[in-house]
Amino acid sequence: MAQTGIHVIATLALLGNVVLAAMALLFVGQKLFKAKGWSKLKRFVSPRSYYFVFGLSLTATLASLFLSEIVKFTPCVLCWYQRIVMYPQIILSYVAIVRNERVLTPYLIILNAIGALVAAYHYSLHLFPNALPVGCNPAIAGVSCIKGYSFYYGFMTFPYMALTVFVLNIILLLMSYNKKRR
């Protein structure tokens, strides 16, 4: 069950990367070739962006809880920092959905940017374990930030998966941001 769960989580993250690549292509296509794909995507996503952010944050939270509580992976300090900024987004995005407000967009973007920076640094520690100063002390969390991780699909670790969610959330929130509402 644990291996199946991890495989599902890694596959969802891979799907998130495919979505990011498609969004990048649509954006570049609009800027370079005046294609309308990005505009159509933005019109579709904008009113639903908080639902997507809620769903992504909930999925990431449940995945992290599955990994720590079911699979018994002990989170390191940097994993905890990423969780600290991910978990409240469920509540914040849910409140925004219920109240039909977009006032939380800048705050959610900041939370996701912080999470993305921590996740990117954490992932870089996995790629270059001897090149960067280690950002956590195993004596504090009981686990090292750079040891014991597997690379799924040849490149993906759990911090990379979190980075995917943070970046997707940022893009979705930016798509929901309407200059006229300010």
Image: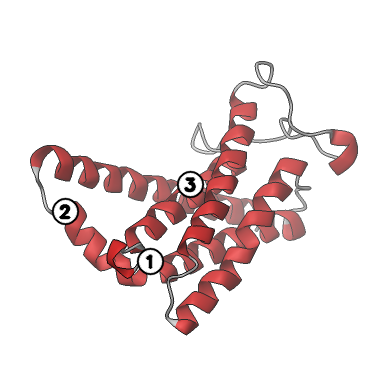
Crowdedness of circle 1 by 10 Å Cα count: few (<14), some, many (20+)? many
Indicate the position of residue 67 as horizontal and vertical percent values: 69, 54
Indicate which disc, 3 or 2, sits on the residue closer to the N terminus: 2
Measured in 3D between alpha carbons, the distance from the residue under mark 1 to the one under mark 2, in whole angstroms, is 17 Å
Question: Which residue: 56% across, 36% down?
Answer: 120
In the picture, measured across the screen, residue 166 lies left or right of residue 142, that is: left
Residue 17, quarter of the rendered image: top left
Indicate the position of residue 158 as horizontal and vertical percent values: 61, 43
Q: Which mark is residue 164?
A: 3
Secondary structure category for the residue under label 2? helix
Secondary structure category for the residue under label 3? helix
Q: Residue placed farthest to the bottom in the image?
A: 98
Q: Contact (CB < 8 A) between labels 3 and 1?
A: no
In the picture, measured across the screen, residue 99 lies left or right of residue 127, that is: left
Question: Which residue: 43% across, 71% down?
Answer: 102
Q: Residue type at mark 1?
A: Ser
- Residue that badge 1 annotates: 49
Secondary structure category for the residue under label 1? helix
Q: Residue type at mark 2?
A: Gly
Q: Contact (CB < 8 A) between labels 3 and 2?
A: no
Question: Which residue: 64% across, 35% down?
Answer: 122
| Of 13 and 138, the residue lying toward us | 138
